[in-house]
Amino acid sequence: MKLHRIIRFATILCFALTLIQEAHAQFRMGVGRRLDNSIKLDYGNPKEYEIAEIDVKGIETLNKSALLSLTGLKVGDKVRIPGDDISNAIRKLWKHGIIGDVSILVNKLEDGQAYLTLQLKERPRLTRFEFDGIGKSQAKELGDKIKLIRGRVLTDAIIKNAELSIRDFYIDKGYLNVNVKTKQIEDTLVTSGVRLKFLVDRKSKVRIDQINVYGADEISAQTVKGKMKKTNENLRFHLPNQLATDLVHVLRPKNLKYWLTHKDTSGVASIKKYLNDNVKMNFFKTTKFIRKDYNEDLKKVVDYYNAKGFRDAQVLEDSVYASGKNRINVDLHIEEGQKYYFRNIDWVGNYVYSDKVMNGILGVKKGDIYDMDLIQKKLTFNPNGKDINGQYMDFGYLAFQCVPVEVRVEGDSIDVEMRIKEGAQFTINKVKVIGNDRTNDHVVYRELRTIPGDKFSREMIIRTQRELSQLGYFDAETISPTPKPNFADETVDIDWGVTERPSDQISLSGGWGGAFGFVGTVGLTFNNFSVKNIFDKSTYRPLPSGDGQKLSLNIQANGVQYQSYSIGFTEPWLGGRKPNSLNVSFNHSIQRIFPFNDFSFKNQIGYLKMWGGSIGLGRRLTWPDDYFTWSNALSVQTYEMDNYDYSRLGFNTGTSTNLSFISTLSRSSVDNPMYPRTGSLLTARLAMTPPYSLFNNKDYDGLSDTEEGRAEKYKFVEFYKINIDLKNYVTVWGDLVLETKAHFGHMGSYSDRVGVGPFERFEMGGSGLSGGNFMLGTDIVSLRGYQDRSLIPFNSDEQIQGGTTFVKYAAELRYPLSLNPSATIYVHTFAEAGNNFNELDNFDPFNVKRSAGVGARIFMPAFGLIGIDWGYGFDTTPTNPNGGPSGSQFHFTIGQQIR
């Protein structure tokens, strides 16, 4: 009975409140005040009137007709006064948010007609906005983020959304307590204009003090926290009393020396265990709390459990609460669930490949830990080998699908059914390249491996991406293939989107070139040159381009003392039908010797001139695979000396000629020429001169006694030379890449009567730049942390400098700061070891000079690759065998260093 009365009373109360609210709305929104005091309205008995006139007042910028259309009222309409028609009209205006205040006034009621006035007050319009309490850079970034439009009607919702956007911006940066207020300032220069000033108080960043994990039994709490890559607790060193005692005991100098000498671990175990369990030793991770990153990390924790077989694992509850000023704690309650294992894996719908083939690719056996993420990787993209999707799509099955389904769960075992829909084989119909504004179509199309008429192949898509990036004409990061399948006729069109990047380079540099003093260099390289368009002015950009040829010009000079000129040309597709390359180059250098500070030609004392040239042919191979290239070149260098005192030769007047045949076999599978992430590079190079000593009758032993004899001995240079270079690239995580490399070189002679002469020897150390040692064709090998060419062994009489055998190992960890095509920048840390030996008998691959350091590289299309390194050499050098380690060295490099 009491319940019935309560319900009835509540119903009557609600009805009464509704009537009061409606009457208030009618008065406030429906009628407003009356202009004619003689008009009497009976609210209990509304009447119907025809609208005879509607006047609009109070607006300055808005259109009257448009506002009237928004109300839904027009002359001739029938309305009830008082009634809902007027209230609804006002609501319609309010809904659009462009009016600050609105009322509809009844001016006159006569003969069944109503004369109304629409009394409005416009909302202000935004003239400009500004920020207070933040810097200019963040103000600009926020200005783009809040998207306020000047001249737009300013509503409460717009202001509130702007405040929320500003708050979210700073919350994402770890300022959880940020406070944002808005101040509206009347703009006296603009009618109904207002300026907004956002008052931003960021306060301090909120950082995580502790992350507490509960319920982690099978997997340790520390491991769980380690999987949260972007949510990290503060480092803590709260040592228990006993632990502090052990630490002090171990670190006493006397005890520390004993512990290091005798490997006594007493007192150390508890310290090590505590540090491992309680200290997250990663000073590069942030401890600020960002909700988006936190939610992603919670998913990573569950994914890790799933990968370990805990299929039902979940974060039951998580809480974030204050632990102090600008500090929070995070509690995670985890339900691990049962650990599961794979039992039976059955294939359904596979007609092209047998179950045995599919199981071999999947690589999952009965009893393996249940991990559906691993299954998905083996289905779609396996970075370490084949995958099911690729097995089908490489043979045209573009519509292939495979869905793994759990069909049975018994105890800790799960059966999975792999349901396959193979579909039809798709044939490539049309191939189009988009974005090559500078490079001619035939240069791009000859590199494509997606050929109309062939079966669609994912492998050929990936390979074509690599080939286009290797050209160097396009931004490797934005090359994008777009397959467009036509399921009706089982064909596919492929659009290749490319973005041209500047590839021509100009180098302006200066440096000290040993005996030459200051040497200036000007170099021009045109990487997309076109010989056939030299006389077509329309192709000049600023030179004729687009055919993929390479033209390089280089000049080095130091007044009249030293000058060097070189020109080279490369045609990568000789004849235009096959990838057979042609390389031609010419060079000329001269160094003159003058009396001290007297550079007049008539007073010239002596000179050394060098003339040279080479011609080579190369081709791509298809065996052992089509990553191989083989090139052969014929090179000639002539050294002409007149009264040129150079102790390495043993004579100062004469002519030496180096005629050599050079054969190079190389294999490159790197994915990007500027910043490789995967792949390898192998180069084996053999250079050899004719074996003159085997068919002439010269007495080489006797020729070594006099200057004239040594000039005759080295009239024709004789040697053979082998170089092997290996590089490998592995992606460690994200864009972090590890480069490992090894280099070996050896040169020898055909006859012991001649031995290895002074030409083409190895010099090691420093940046690898040649400086002024072009004269004898010296092979410069870099080794950072040591001075340039400081690792140079001498022969027995200390006349001939340079090694005949060298070895070098290096590892470099790289991370990019920018992969923008206009400026590719990355930093790296490296460790190197190498040595240079005078004779093969002295060669020891483990007797090396070691170094380590850091550096940076920047590639700008106009200037090429520029780098700076700091290295520390840990060992002595042959030029200072009794000194200390080489120590700290800075190195500046230009261009790609091969070794």
Image: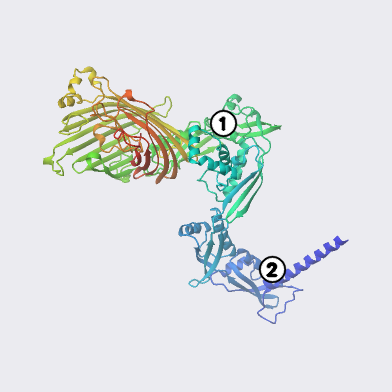
Nearest to N terminus: mark 1 or mark 2? 2
The residue tagged with tag 1: helix, strand or loop?
helix
Q: Position of residue 395 (x, y in %)?
A: 52, 29
Q: Is residue 128 visible?
A: yes
- In the displayed structure, 291 sits above or below 89; it is above
Most foreground residue, 232 or 636:
232
Q: Amino acid at mark 2?
A: Asp
> Where is the N terminus found, in terms of image quarters?
bottom right
- As drawn, the residue found furthest toward the bottom would be 38
Q: Which residue, given by chain and number where applicable, does mark 2 sit on?
A: 85
Residue 780's tag is none
Along the horizontal axis of the image, is 38 left or right of 15? left
Which image quadrant for residue 793? top left
Q: Is residue 80 visible?
A: no
Q: Position of residue 133 (x, y in %)?
A: 50, 62
Q: Position of residue 484 (x, y in %)?
A: 52, 39
Q: Position of residue 788 (x, y in %)?
A: 30, 37
Q: Which residue, given by chain and number where applicable, does mark 1 sit on?
A: 388
Q: How many numbered marks appear?
A: 2
Q: Amino acid at mark 1?
A: Ile
- In the displayed structure, 602 sits above or below 793; it is below
> Where is the C terminus found, in terms of image quarters?
top left
Most foreground residue, 273 or 62:
273
Q: At 82% across and 65% down in the image, what residue appears? A: 9
Along the horizontal axis of the image, is 27 left or right of 875? right
